[in-house]
Image (cartoon, rainbow, N blue to C red):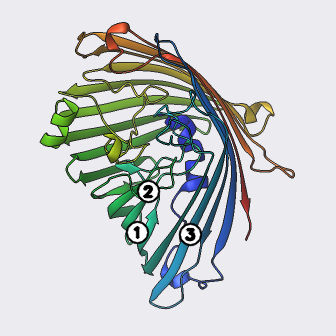
Amino acid sequence: MNKVFSFSFLALLVAQPAFAASQQESNGFIEDSHLDLLIKNAMFNRNYKDDGVRTRREWGQAFIGTYSSGFTQGVVGFGVDAIGQYAVRLDGGRGRSGAGGIDFFAQDSDGRAKSDLVKFGATAKMRVSNTVLSYGTQRPTLPILTSDSSRLLAETYTGVMLDSQEIDGLDISGGYFTAEQRKSAESQNTGLDSITFGGAKYVFNDQFTASAYASHNQDVDNKQYLGFTYTQPFTEKQKMIWDFNGYNTRLDKTYAEKLNSGRSNTIWSLAASYVYDIHTFKIAYQQNSGSTGYMYGGYRNRGGLGDGGNTIWVANSYWSDFNGQDERSWQAAYSLDLSGLGVEGLRYDVAYVRGDNIKTSASSNGHEHEFFNQVQYKVPAGFAKNLRIGLRYSVLRVSSDASGYNLGGNEFRIIAQYPLSIF
């Protein structure tokens, strides 16, 4: 899963609704309400290079409407949120759908992808001071549990979530979810028993931010996350950014036995980025250790963890996550903001990642490498203002002795997103 592409749109399009600074600033249930519509067209094409693995391609058109009310006035404020999602399949019928990593339209029992999807959700919320308690359809964007919105429709959960910002710079979050809704299907539950999570992010100052979270996924695993970002400015146009992310996971014994897997994994990455005006140069190192690779996402009724399809906030995650057992990987990347050259809204990213030391049943030194290219453009003005178009092409190659862990191929993605504010 790729964070460069996914998270560049995430905050604007599918993040949890933004609340006023405090309940005291509430203007009212109707006065602070807003309705937004996201028009989204996406196509993924994966041309696998392994013998006997067919090319997979899915293409669809989606309309995602989100309503967020304000809070009633008073010491305790009440409100509601709602989301409606509709998608129609444009391509990806029998023989081309079914790749777990694409997952636009789930297949029926006969192998045919669904022709369209309709999904609804609602959330009740309550606020006291700077603390919001909500129940219903949730779309968390925490490193310990990140619902996937990088495909066509959004993955959602059902449960209780708390967000508190009573202390300046400190954001405390926690929740208890009892159902996960697959992004490519209309079913209200994918077999999740329950997942409990919590943690905090603290902005110490303009230069240093740290966060720590943990989760307990019933009958699946316990997972902890630690991350920090440190920025060292040199001049107005120059700075260094250090970014660390790490997870520690312990699988449930019975669950690990079903997967014929080990139980423990630690994965961490450290990235250093040098920003000079419109240029960003990045190098990163990522390391796995333990008796299994890092696991995340998927759906419980399909053998997955069910803890969010984007719950992998590490540096070397593109098409491949470079998360095999004992795998270590290096990255060199470059980004260019062409706004500085007179093309406002245009950005280019390129990266090369190489991983080795992958342990499988066939080898203890499997390897893989990926060459990643991406162009993103946001229309800065005019009738199509805020229209975003992303084009991405990856070349991934995996050694034959690591084919049990990952598959190589060429991948092309195009996503166009047009957000509209109705009121």
Residue drawn at (54%, 87%) of the image: 72
The answer to whether residue 28 is left or right of residue 243 is right
Mark 2 vs mark 3, CA separation in Å? 15 Å
Tell me the amino acid under the disc marked 3: Ala
Question: Mark 2 = which residue?
Answer: 140
Residue drawn at (42%, 31%) of the image: 315
Residue 134 location, quadrant: bottom left
Question: Mark 3 = which residue?
Answer: 82
The answer to whether residue 140 is left or right of residue 86 is left
Residue 374 is situated, as x and y percent measured from the top left of the image, at: 63, 27
Q: Secondary structure at mark 2?
A: loop
Q: Residues within 10 Å of mark 2 (few under 14, many from 20)?
A: many
Q: Nearer the viewer, mark 3 or mark 1?
A: 3
Residue 72, visible in the rendered structure:
yes
Residue 242 is situated, as x and y percent measured from the top left of the image, at: 42, 35
- Pick the front one: 168 or 361: 361
